[in-house]
Amino acid sequence: MSYRSTSVKSKWTKTKWLNKNANLRKYVPQTLPFSRSNLSSMLSQYSTVFFKPTGGSGGFNIVRIKKLANGYQTQHNTVKTRYSTFDALFGQLKQRSRQRPYLLQKGINLAKTKGRPFDIRVMIQKSNAGAWKCTGIFTKIGRPGKVATNYNQGGNVGFLQQTLSGSGYSQGRIEKKRNELINLGLSVGRLFDQHLRGFRELGLDVALDGEGRSWILEVNTRPQFYPLKKFKDKSMYREMLNYGKQYGRKK
Ligand SMILES: Nc1ncnc2c1ncn2[C@@H]1O[C@H](COP(=O)(O)OP(=O)(O)O)[C@@H](O)[C@H]1O
Ligand SMILES: [Mg+2]
């Protein structure tokens, strides 16, 4: 993947950029580097906390931590484990991290479509002329029983229209949400441009909670879109590929 668009792997670096901006900060679920004291303070505030590798991708090594009445439960892929003390939980996560940096993030209770949790990919790309455009929005519908909705984790892709309609959104609310997501994408593009040169594409992972509020889970600098090939209507795939070709992206 050696095409010409700046890549930033660290989710922590990108989260700090978002948090420096007063308008974007409110879309970021609280995120802190993994440490004993940060784990303790996050679990005192939230009933669910996500543990994820700072340099990870593809939904790998994502652990969901839930506070129980008496102890904690983690879930990695479909495997659930119970810990009766904070020390046991921390010890296990520490071991799992193997000295690599991890982040803790407030868990968002993902909205569901036809009973399945989903989140949203907002793709923005820059043409040679240099202005950001939202070239597509699609949804990632999680495989039941898993904590990450990624295609790599058995998730499915969908159109925003169908997914939100399957989530009980009226036509009016769908259009409002679509506009909000487009504007969110463009704002993130302009913000990233203030920090580094050479971004030609970004893919936001946006979660909706039960109240319909949007949360940016991460911003990808190497966003995949090949799963869109399986839609009968390939216009979104073609649009992304056409933009991508301008900076040397082939698939
Ligand atoms: N804070 C969170 N709340 C709810 N779900 C989350 C959270 N963080 C991650 N997830 C789930 O895990 C998936 C992968 O997390 P993400 O941060 O996008 O990392 P990756 O780089 O591996 O895709 C998300 O698409 C979402 O389904
Ligand atoms: Mg992701």
Image (cartoon, rainbow, N blue to C red):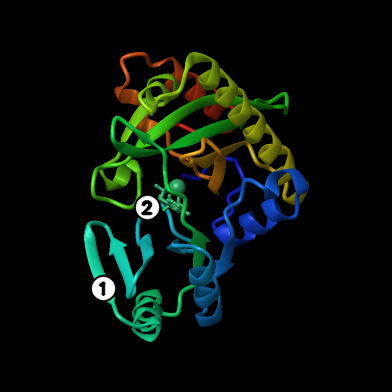
Residue at screen point 29% across, 62% down: 76
Give residue 156's position: percent from left, percent from top: 30, 34
| Residue 250 in view here | yes
- Using residue 51 as the reference point, say whether residue 201 is left or right of it: right
Residue at screen point 26% across, 42% down: 143
| Residue 10 in view here | no
Q: Amino acid at mark 2?
A: Gly
Indicate whether 54 appears above or below 157. below
- Using residue 66 as the reference point, say whether residue 134 is left or right of it: right
Q: Residues within 10 Å of mark 1 (few under 14, many from 20)?
A: some
Give residue 38's position: percent from left, percent from top: 55, 75
- Using residue 241 as the reference point, say whether residue 127 is left or right of it: right
The quadrant holding residue 23 is top right
Label 2: element kind: loop
Q: Is mark 2 within 8 Å of ligand 1?
A: yes
Compare residues 247 and 178 and report the one nearer the observer: 178
- State which quarter of the image contains the C terminus: top left
Residue at screen point 51% across, 61% down: 105
Label 1: element kind: strand
* Label of residue 59 in the image: 2
Give residue 69's position: percent from left, percent from top: 34, 70
- Disc 1 or 2, which lies upstream in sequence? 2
Residue placed under numbered mark 1 in the picture: 82
Compare residues 26 and 227 and report the one nearer the observer: 26
The quadrant holding residue 224 is top left
Residue most toward the front? Answer: 69
Indicate whether 100 appears above or below 225. below
Q: Residues within 10 Å of mark 2 (few under 14, many from 20)?
A: some
Q: Amino acid at mark 1?
A: Arg
What is the CA distance from the residue labelled 1 to the residue labelled 2?
22 Å
Give residue 126's position: percent from left, percent from top: 65, 29
